Amino acid sequence: MQLPIYLDYAATTPVDPRVAKRMSECLSMEGVFGNPASRSHIYGWQAEQEVELARRHVADLIHCDPREIVWTSGATEADNLAIKGVAEFHADRGRHIVTSCIEHKAVLDSCHYLETKGFEISYLRPSSSGLISPEQLSEAIRADTVLVSLMHVNNEIGSANNLAALGEVTRSRQVLFHVDAAQSVGKLPIDLAALNVDLMSLSAHKVYGPKGIGALFVRREPRVNLTAQIHGGGHERGMRSGTLPTHQLVGMGEAFRLAGDVLHDEYVKVGQLRARLLDGLKMLPGWQLHGHADQCAPGIINLGFEGVDGESLLMSLRQLAVSSGSACMSATLEPSYVLRGIGIPDDIAQSALRVSLGRFTTAADVDTAVAAISQNVQQLRRSSATG
């Protein structure tokens, strides 16, 4: 059986073989398998050393202090810890939070939960290209605002918010700024030494690392306080309890180290593949690109096709592993809330196709995708016209 070409890197990335090798060295009796919290013997010491090296690799990629990295089970948990943790800690000071209507469900559902606890949430509507402006954010902040949570790169359309400009607004208004960077870290440069970002959610499996592991950056200066959401042992300086999975942390650290080594070259390569795909579709009429054409992560490409049923298009593209949007929302037949949020009509949103490129994508893969999309869109249009 021939597998389809994988073009769904925004959903997850395959683990880089070099990462898998490092992880395998932390599983068996012959490797570093100990509990990092075991301080009475060499097995624990070796594991702790590996965990702290991984913490440094993660910190180096985003230019922060390793002590500002708190391990979590993934970006979803990091989002929950940042939003609920800040809200609970600062509830006496204010109960207003600002976010946008196109955030990841981990952010939106955390905010919906807080609404049941008496918090007020302002959901900003982005521009048609999927961006939040500094002016828009400034108008939304109030005297009782305790947190702003806005993603760096949108997981469905790839548009990238200007973190520097948004961070200037939050810092000047003395409001904490949380950023979900699951789709941007390792794809775009991030310098937390220069950005006014207070909390940042990270994921390993979007950067060629393992699933089930992530981290939350929590700034030390100016100090960010939050309330732990998982209790039981006081691990991670009391912010996140639980035995640390050495093999997964080593995998995340190695994945982030490799990402730093190839960041520029990979950005250029993926950008060229993006241009190749969009240029290849120019001869096909009746389609549009969703999101910002330039201010984006180049690997995420969201396309809408006129006169085509999205589910039928997806089913016809059996030689391609692509999606209609976020993997978290793939079970629903509703048009994407992200596309609706940027003003895309339901009929076009229903026909949307997300193609996401990555480290192992080739020019031949892109050419195959262009041919398959063009052929199937035209065939579906003909069938619709004659039906």
Image (cartoon, rainbow, N blue to C red):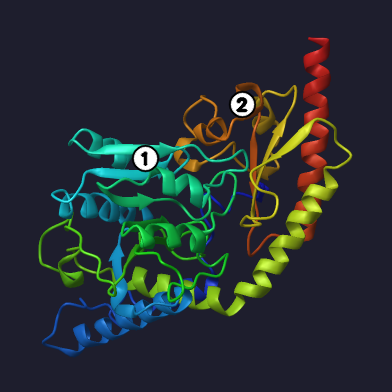
Query: Residue lying furthest top in this view?
Result: 387
The structure residue drawn at horizontal position 49% and vertical position 78%, both measured from the top left corner, is 257
Q: Residues within 10 Å of mark 2 (few under 14, many from 20)?
A: many
Query: Residue lying furthest bottom in this view?
Result: 42
Q: Residue 25: image x %, image y %?
A: 38, 79
**In this image, 115 relative to 322: left or right?**
left
**Which residue matches tag 2?**
350
Q: Residue 375: image x %, image y %?
A: 83, 34
197 up-or-down from 305: above or below: below
User: Which dot, 2 or 1, sits closer to the camera?
Assistant: 1
Q: Quadrant of the C terminus?
A: top right
**In this image, 158 relative to 193: left or right?**
right
Residue 23 in view, yes or no: no
Foreground pick, 365 / 196: 196
Three-letter amino acid code of the residue under disc 1: Leu
The structure residue drawn at horizontal position 55% and vertical position 70%, both measured from the top left corner, is 189
Q: Earlier in the sequence, mark 2 or mark 1?
A: 1
Q: CA distance from mark 2 to mark 1?
A: 21 Å
Three-letter amino acid code of the residue under disc 2: Gln
Q: Residue 7: image x %, image y %?
A: 64, 50
Query: Residue lying furthest right in this view?
Result: 283
**Which residue matches tag 1?**
108
142 up-or-down from 361: above or below: above
The structure residue drawn at horizontal position 59% and vertical position 50%, both measured from the top left corner, is 159
235 up-or-down from 273: above or below: below
User: Is label 1 in a helix, a strand or a loop?
Assistant: helix
Would you identify the image quadrant in which residue 101 lies? Answer: top left
The structure residue drawn at horizontal position 36% and vertical position 57%, both measured from the top left corner, is 178
User: Is label 2 in a helix, a strand or a loop?
Assistant: loop
